[in-house]
Image (cartoon, rainbow, N blue to C red):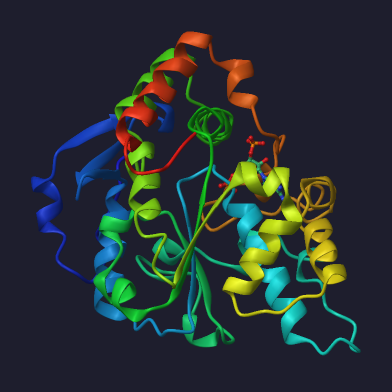
Amino acid sequence: METDLQGFHEDTSFLSTLPKTKWKLGGDMTILQWKGFWFMPEVVKSVISIENQFNPIPSDILLVSFPKTGTTWLKALTATILDHSSYPKSHSRTDPLQTRNPHELIPFLELETFGENPPRDINQFPSPRVFSTHFPYSALPESIKNSGCRIIYISRNPADAFVSGWHFYKMMFGSKIPLEEAFDDFCKGTVPRGPFVDHVLEYWLQREKKNVLFVTYEELTEDPNVHVRRIAEFLGCSLSGDEVEQVVWKCSYARLSKLGVNNGEEERVNFSGMKLSSFFRRGVVGDGKKLLSPEMVERIETLAKHKWEGSGLEL
Ligand code: A3P
């Protein structure tokens, strides 16, 4: 799929000077290397639109992830925590997840709020404004980095993230490439927002800033109450033990994946036409090891260990 950049207002001519390759699992889509990472052309363009048009404020909340690492879950948790804290305890809460998929509640900054014909108008957002993005830290617009807005990053085991993406993108693009080739691209980093290991490391290195919180899919799975409380405290929301339990349950895979808004019954799609039900597949830790050979798992884990050596970041 070639991308048409005609509708953007900013000058896009520099894009033609960037290194490019094909993302095979994405139906041979052209991706460009920029600031050390690979992007679809319209995403590079949207970073520049954001630089020029977005005025982030300290109360904004940005949820960041590499694709397929738990974005949907983090969106659900954030929306529910904020919902709990914005209603007095005596009032019944709205439970936004009952009728909306998490992606309908919190949009991506790139393409959904900026870029070509964005379908959402951020001026209509209630405070605090919550956005999500898959931008690596080095491509994050300076205005965002300097705003002091809160950033929550979710990371996941690389083999699990790859396998989640393998199923998702095959469904999305109908690509027939062998698993080994797609995995090779993932390890080389020639996938959108890749290399994965650099993406995670960049945010890990920011984690000591008071406006940055780093969580992992695995720790959320293992001890959801502890980490939901951490997220709530980071967002400045004080939740009782009961409320933490409720948030954990409301956002659990077991519950969300069965709701009509998420299970395909309602045939809902996102801004790019992707079925919203496809954001729920299995929701478990360790799926990577089931599909990949031990050699493949070792390859990606060795790569991660090597890249992360000395940083304190572990698998
Ligand atoms: P699997 O494909 O391994 O099942 P993203 O939201 O970043 O696209 O990631 C999608 C992955 O998160 C999928 O993983 C999906 O099943 C899982 N997921 C979605 N909602 C979840 C939830 N509430 N709890 C745990 N995992 C969830």
The residue closer to the viewer here, 142 or 239, is 239
In the image: residue 265, left or right of residue 77: right
In the image: residue 95, left or right of residue 293: right
- Determine the quadrant in which ligand 1 lies: top right
Position in image of residue 200 (x %, y %): 40, 46
The residue closer to the viewer here, 43 or 214, is 214
The residue closer to the viewer here, 118 or 23, is 23
At 32% from the left and 42% from the top, the residue drawn is 198
In the displayed structure, 88 sits above or below 156; it is below
At 28% from the left and 68% from the top, the residue drawn is 141
The residue closer to the viewer here, 94 or 46, is 94
At 23% from the left and 71% from the top, the residue drawn is 9
Position in image of residue 3 (x %, y %): 30, 47
Tell me which corner region of the image, top left, top right, bottom left or bottom right, holds residue 87. bottom right
Residue 256 shows up from this direction:
yes
At 63% from the left and 73% from the top, the residue drawn is 233
Position in image of residue 13 (x %, y %): 10, 57
Residue 54 shows up from this direction:
no
Position in image of residue 170 (x %, y %): 53, 28
Quick one: quadrant of the N terminus? top left
In the displayed structure, 87 sits above or below 31; it is below
In the displayed structure, 107 sits above or below 261; it is below
Number of numbered discs visible in the structure rendering = 0
